[in-house]
Image: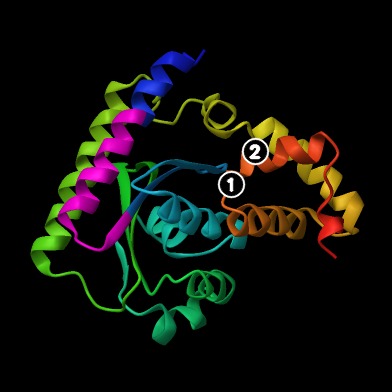
Amino acid sequence: MLDPDNLDGVTHRLGQVCSNLAAELTGMGVAISLMSADGPFGVAAASDEASRAADELQFAAGEGPCHDAYAARRPVLTPDLRGTGGARWPGFTSMALSSGVAAVFAFPLHVGAAGFGVMDVFSDTAGSLSLPQQNRALTYAKMAVGILLDGDVVTAAGHLDGGLSDALDGRAEIHQAQGMTMVDLAVGPAEALTRMRAHAFAHGKPLAELAREIIDGYSLAQEG
């Protein structure tokens, strides 16, 4: 079983990777999402709250550079979301542009065929990463993979620990709140989760915190 204390150490070290890379890439933010073939676990670490929220948008939309980078096991570099993102990821691009994200560079975290997640670099201005910047990002991505391999969150079969999802962000509470939102708003599961993530982003709070509020009686229907 996954040790929560050990997970805390892993996410702290992943947070340092994000912060250190962001410091080298002036004006950019970094976030790391852990993913599996069965579905995304969610955002594990970020250099700042804006980057965490931007990464959450990809899960709200069910699309985006991180999904493509994870599936293809190669970087997906999008220097101008406004110019090229809309055709590939219309839902994510619309939300990202509205939140001030202009460019996204996604670097997969993998060893061979085993994928663990993606490290995303966000910029509020359009423009490509230079080759040295790309190389720095790739170096930090390898650091993140090393942390995951050393942190006992990867099984002997090369997969992320199955208990990681709940440990990361209270996924059970999120699922419960998602079901309550489906009933309140008379919408499907994907739309309910999208509404929750959008509300959490707009109010500057973690999704797990909003989920607890919904369970305690808050309804997104109150938003009108």
What's the magenta region?
A: 12-29
Does 5 sit left or right of 144 as displayed?
right
Answer whether residue 74 is visible to the viewer in this image. Answer: no
Q: Residue 85 carries which label?
A: none
Does 76 sit left or right of 168 as displayed?
left
Q: Name the residue under label 2.
A: 209
Q: Which mark is residue 205?
A: 1
Q: What element carries label 1?
A: loop
Out of 167 and 114, give the one closest to the viewer: 167
Q: Which residue is drawn at 59% across and 60% down?
A: 62
| Quarter of the rendering containing residue 130 | bottom left
Type of the residue with mark 2: Glu
Out of 68 and 156, give the one closest to the viewer: 68
Locate residue 148, reporting x and y percent. Answer: 32, 30
Answer whether residue 17 is visible to the viewer in this image. Answer: yes
Question: Is 19 covered by the magenta stretch?
Answer: yes
Q: Relative to 44, is 101 above or below?
A: below
